[in-house]
Amino acid sequence: MSELAAEPGSGADLHLEVRGPRVLAGLKEALREAVRSGRLTPGARLPSTRSLAADLGIARNTVVAAYAELVAEGWLSSRQGAATRVATAHGAAPPDRACADPDPARPLHDLRPGTPDVAAFPRAEWLRAARRVFDRAPDRAFSYPDVRGTEELRTALAAYLARARGVRTDPERIVVCAGAAHGLRLLATALRARGTDSVFTEGYGLDLHRRLLTESGLRTPCLPMDGHGARTDLLAQTSGAGAVVLTPAHQFPSGEVLSGDRRAAVIRWARNTGAVVVEDDYDGEFRYENPPVGSLQALDPGHVAYLGTASKSLAPGLRLGWLVVPEILADQLSRALGEFGMCGTLDQLVLAELLGSGAYDRHVRAMRARYRRRREQLSEMLAGRARSRLSGASAGLHAIVNVPSGCEAAIIGAAEADGLALCGISRFRHPRGQDDRDAIVVGYATPSASAWAGALAALEAVLP
Amino acid sequence: MSELAAEPGSGADLHLEVRGPRVLAGLKEALREAVRSGRLTPGARLPSTRSLAADLGIARNTVVAAYAELVAEGWLSSRQGAATRVATAHGAAPPDRACADPDPARPLHDLRPGTPDVAAFPRAEWLRAARRVFDRAPDRAFSYPDVRGTEELRTALAAYLARARGVRTDPERIVVCAGAAHGLRLLATALRARGTDSVFTEGYGLDLHRRLLTESGLRTPCLPMDGHGARTDLLAQTSGAGAVVLTPAHQFPSGEVLSGDRRAAVIRWARNTGAVVVEDDYDGEFRYENPPVGSLQALDPGHVAYLGTASKSLAPGLRLGWLVVPEILADQLSRALGEFGMCGTLDQLVLAELLGSGAYDRHVRAMRARYRRRREQLSEMLAGRARSRLSGASAGLHAIVNVPSGCEAAIIGAAEADGLALCGISRFRHPRGQDDRDAIVVGYATPSASAWAGALAALEAVLP
């Protein structure tokens, strides 16, 4: 085999086998075979004749002739002054799902929860921050990063979480993870290693979270809920569970804020039994009317593991989240991390830069204003209706629209027929949960600014 | 509690509790407490007096007075025309391990293997490509990505791996992972799910890889090696193992290329027994003298899982690698992936852009020339010595310097005393391996261009 290395400008390293005694015929057949097998894809640039000839130790004229004959045969194409390329008529066409094409499987309107308005991602700010990071980062920023995340991001997060969420921590307690699911998986592994075999989960919640816990070998008994959030007052009557996962600032999906009594009760239980409380603070930055609710973690940093994410405040595509790990779980979590981080250094440094410069806060504030308006519009739309009723705190990126008993599935079906994707509360019900309310979980953050009005109108048309 | 939300320009969302009947005293004490507890870190910007007053529903003059008095007390600092900030004299100083400071724990010279010359990371090209990606990416690029990696990167990798490494694949068979360790962990989980309980590993190799396999519940019997690479000819005499992990292009660390006979033997074994061959192609792009060795995967894409990484060709800090998954492992690997990808979309899109534009090839070519020169210089330095001898293929980012029996530890110790970090081959020996050669595994890619000559001289000084 011989490497056909191209000159610096040509952009392609080939990997061909030139067979047979006749060099020209051998080279042509090797190139044809590379195109046929798909190793050279349509549109791929070929090396210049000079560098290919030099690398093969053959006459340049032979390469010129081979290229010319393959162009004549339709295998390659060439234009005056441009590189010779593989013609697009040969070989399997590459899958061309160009970015600009709309995905035919996507609904016309999407009000399912879980995704922020990604059209509002602060591209210009991100790119500016990236430029500053590249100007300044030491070479070792490109080497293997600290498995807990870069020190720059952990330091910036410690300051941010303290002032914005009241979290009590320092950079040494923070672990950067690849989104909340990764963070919860790390916590589950650490809890299992600590000897925990059972973790209470809320009566309504993400099926994914229960599954992640189950896959780590943990049982997930159900903690009932009422209008004040999870019934943490019941924990003292239980035995055996070494942890609970809660969404105290804004219960997902039902929207309640965990009351002060319930907060005190869960901390009391954790202290009395040595249990760990996992606080999933997925949308804590977004509060619209009531005063902000501080983190549960601030009540007892020794027993609460705090889990946050950039997926709602910036974009899920970043795959960045963070854990604040209590001392009692630190060793186990460190072992769960392994030896290599999952998160690229560059995005971490850019996020640290945005947090430090105030650009992150400005973005959150702008999005908060936008989502608040949307929630108000949703509320106004529902104001005149007796059979569809908004509930939950005025916060976050989703709202609960309660509908008459037995109507949930029919509404979702009717919406789907109109090109509106909706999500019912029933899919979030704990398999051993008692409550069987009917409601739509409206993710009002999902549409772009231009798509919002249409999505709201589509929702109006299907609600009773 | 009350949120002290700042105006858009000020950069800070606070989270304070203003206590007591007297507003001014209450506000001052709340701010002092926030500084004391570290929730407001030294240097942090405070909201403007206007927005803070508006948010608290108090007179602006009260906030002006509170700021002025706290400046007078030394808690805050203000300069004409700039935002009021927390003074740096109060509160715990933030950990200031500024990027520019050299790490005192780092050796003066580092010739341990595993890291490329990160000072050569193509910052300008990366940033230019990032700008193009931001100009062009659809909004949904910021939403939850395909768990297998973005289609753009999988498509670019399929074309690149075909032409540069002879890999036979298409984008649907590729999975983007967060570096090779993550990729191997995914493969281990998939193999375990397929019923494999034993995976052959080479007589010398990364302890980390054996540990990852063991943690997934797999045994790791030893496949002996000789001067032609791993003894895959012995596999036919074994029974029970459902897989083998090999480094065929450039055995790590010993540096041999797996011979043609040995390649044929392992493929024959895989076909006869239904086993999976994991090809760890960690540095396949880097060949200096001999013709490039194509991937083992090309011999039988149905039985070989191919594992590649950007950690050697670009930078470990990216945490990007890739798998080409054979059909027989596809379902299990898909389940091992779970529901959320680990890799940020932005870096994936930038890498796809670099692969498509030819900038990646240009970078690899430039680094290949640089590493080739370093290897030649190392070879020249050793040429006159009888007791230190280079071995292994002229390839990759490391070389084996064989030293007299019993000398390895003494050389490493002497080097350490001189500020030169070295790594002996013994630390890569399989616990059940037979060979006990003494050698230094010299990672000649690790130093920056300016540090290389000094590192080589330091090595020269300690070798016998």
Image: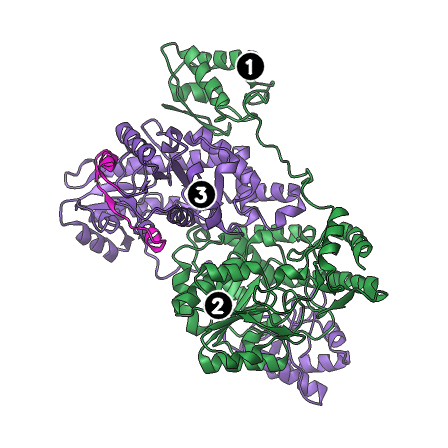
Chain colours: A purple, B green
What is the count of numbered marks?
3
Q: Are marks 2 and 1 on the same chain?
A: yes
How many other residues sit within 10 Å of disc 3, few (<14), some (14-19) or many (≥20)? many
| Quadrant of the image containing the C terminus of chain B | bottom right
Checking the image for residue A310, the label placed there is 3
Can residue B171 be seen here?
yes
Instruction: Tell me the chain of label 2.
Output: B
Circle 2 residue? B171
Instruction: Tell me the chain of label 3.
Output: A
How many other residues sit within 10 Å of disc 2, few (<14), some (14-19) or many (≥20)? many
Would you say A244 lies left or right of B171 here?
left
In the image, residue A92 sits, relative to residue B67, either above or below, namely: below
Can residue B321 be seen here?
no
Label 2 or label 1, whichever comes before in sequence order: 1
Q: Amino acid at mark 1?
A: Val
Would you say A307 lies left or right of A219 here?
right
In the image, residue A459 sits, relative to residue A173, either above or below, namely: below
User: Residue drawn 67% across and 87% down?
Assistant: A25
Q: Is residue A227 magenta?
A: yes
Label 2 sits on a secondary structure element that is: helix
Q: Amino acid at mark 3?
A: Ala
Q: Is residue B194 magenta?
A: no
Circle 1 residue? B71
Q: Amino acid at mark 2?
A: Pro
Residue span colored magenta: A212-239
The x and y percentages for residue A81 are 69, 68
Could you tell me if the residues under marks 3 and 1 are in contact, i.e. CB atoms within 8 Å?
Answer: no
Instruction: Tell me the chain of label 1.
Output: B
The x and y percentages for residue B59 are 41, 13
